[in-house]
Image (cartoon, rainbow, N blue to C red):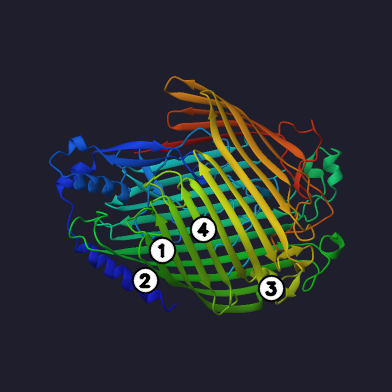
Amino acid sequence: MRLLPVLFVFALGAGISAAQVPVETEEMQAKSQQISTEVIPPSDPSDAGIFTTTTAADESSYLPLTPQQQRDSARRARLLGIARNKGETVYYFDYAMQSGLPVFDTMRYPLDGFQIFDATYQHHDFRNSRGSLGMPDQLLEFDPASSSGFVFKKNPFSSWFYTKENTPFLQTKTPYSYLYFVNNFGKNLNLFNATHYQNVARGLNLGIDFRVYDVFGAYYNSRSTQYNVRLGGNYITRDAKYRVMLGYIYNVGKVGENGGIRADSLFTKNLETGRLRIPVNIASGQSRWREHRVFVKHSYHFYDNQKDSIAENNRSYGYLTHDFDISVYKFSYNDQTSAADGFYENFFLNPNRSDDTVKMLKLTNRLFYSSSDMEYIPFGYRFKVAAGIRNEYVRFRDSVGFDTLLHLRDWVQWFPFAEIQVDFADRFVLDAYADFGFGGYNRYDFSGYVRFKYLFRNDRERTLSKREGVELKVGVNRFSPDWIFSYHSSNHYFWEYEWKKNIEAYAQLNFAYKGWWMRAKAGLLQNYTFMKKDGPVQAEDAFWLVNVTAGKNARIGRYVGWDNLLMLAYSSDNRYLHLPLFSMQESVYGIIPIKNIAEIHIGVEVMYNTAYYGDAYNPDMLSYYWQDEVKTGNFAFLNLYINFQVKRANIFIKGINLAQGLMGYNYIQTPHYPLQDRCVRFGVSWRFFD
């Protein structure tokens, strides 16, 4: 909280400085509007369906200007990310150590992959799913911690919620709107998404993004509803010395918690075709996860602008960057079960009803100085350094019944951090990062890594994270288990433990080239903490974990498309962690162009993973847990789809689980939660640029 005055003073000083800079001349404005573009395929799997636009000045148009002035003018337009043409929308995602002007990508809406449920979120991972859209799920790929800090628990809605990390910051010349709607032909599912951004003033763009899911579910008490709202804005001064990003996120996930079906045999043997007549474990359970989040990030570039207002040949004295993030979480669970129902064994407070609530406030300030932007390579520096400190304030409370307080605790903790980066010949990059925790729950936590990256191309218009190349990363993390492992209190469960620190030693190899990508991870886990049916457990022995994930969205000739995603996974000790040995998501489609006005894709999707003891799900804790009684997987989930594109509209019609019954009824991925039965889905999107 003591850093809050810094935000006000920092913003005020930057605003005064921005008001004193020279105004761009008409000559400079005119030349910055004459930009040619070159399209480069995406090099990162998260960029599926998105191309990067690079700019180069047309020197023949600028004969009165020097070559340096021409380069500066082109660079000005690109760095400021100002869309020059009607219908053009550029955007970027923020990185933790990014301080300078971002590198903008051009937004486009291809037909490839449009039949995926939500066009704003492309699935590039494998998850343990409960079958219905918007339901909690679990990532199956090993994901080492990226930095130290307090974590209440893994968000089970992480693949559906808006986050700071998946928020795009847009710049657009004319107002930009996007509408998206999906329906199961009048029943079971409705999805609506609306986005609007517009340029309010020079360098200032504001927007809103709203999304709602409403999925009724095939089984009793299996309805899921979500509301996601995102307000965003970004501003860059004329001289590009100061920029600020700000946003507000509101997420609500509400799900009917039926505890799964009581007898899987009724489903797997198809003894009862009426899904609502299959008995479930809990008739009245419901959980709700709600979060508010406000974040601001701003940075000031210290440089001498005597030569040109933003020319990169000016002398730079580095960046001062400040982050502010406040998050408010509320998780509630209620049911009207009793011991006679047989699902829960313990009833500590009320034998007939549960009303449990957890509330948490997390306030984060981060202030650091960097000699250069740590994400942009090259930037005229061969050696870069950044250092700063992060402060977290956490307030946690839980209650039962009618707001009966059980537990109230707060922490203040500090994390100094530093990063060093060296690049050679604009192709080789050596990067090292470390942070350390003081005070609070995360005392003596540590996170650090060293990575070496070779870049295939001297692509100056891409950030370090997105440039094609081979990267080797080696790291170690020493951290406290998520808070839910140390403390949990409800009507059905109670524990309070002190655990040993978890330790992850890992190596990761990343590869990206012309759309092909791969990430291979190997980790040695010690004191691994995980859930079992009755509560948390810490592993007695260290064990190995290996993941290899790869994919590419490709065109085979002119008329065939192929999107694929594969994963191999292995755990050396199944006492602590089960993983499917092999998983895949494949899509093959034919392409039918209709002159220059339309395109049609007709394709098939297949999803498969080998059999394994998939983690089960506990409604009371809104968490997955280890089990070794029921095997899931070893089935093919088959979908058929047709995508249409006509001008600005995209349309799809999709048949879900067309192979139902042909290979049995074992399509269960989370124990006791069958995947969707055969159905037909319809979706349409429309975009506007005026």
Q: Mark 1 or mark 4, which has the lower sequence index?
A: 1
Q: Please, what is the three-letter code of the amino acid marked with disc 2?
A: Leu
Name the residue tied to disc 4: 451
Residue 194, x across and y down, in percent: 47, 45
Distance from label 3 to label 2 (Cα)?
A: 34 Å
Tag 2–tag 1 contact (CB < 8 Å): yes
Residue 499, x across and y down, in percent: 70, 74
Name the residue tied to disc 1: 296
Question: Residue visible at 15% across and 43% down?
Answer: 65
Q: Mark 3 or mark 2, which has the lower sequence index?
A: 2
Q: Mark 3 or mark 4, which has the lower sequence index?
A: 4
The quadrant the C terminus occupies is top left
Near mark 3 (Cα within 10 A), the count class, few <14, some 14-19 or many ≥20, is some
Label for residue 486? 3
94 left or right of 190 in image: left
Q: Closest to the observer: 330 or 185?
A: 330
Name the residue tied to disc 2: 7
Distance from label 3 to label 4 (Cα)?
A: 32 Å
Tag 1–tag 4 contact (CB < 8 Å): no
Near mark 4 (Cα within 10 A), the count class, few <14, some 14-19 or many ≥20, is some
Question: Residue visible at 19% across and 44% down?
Answer: 67
Residue 115, x across and y down, in percent: 57, 35
Distance from label 2 to label 4 (Cα)?
A: 32 Å
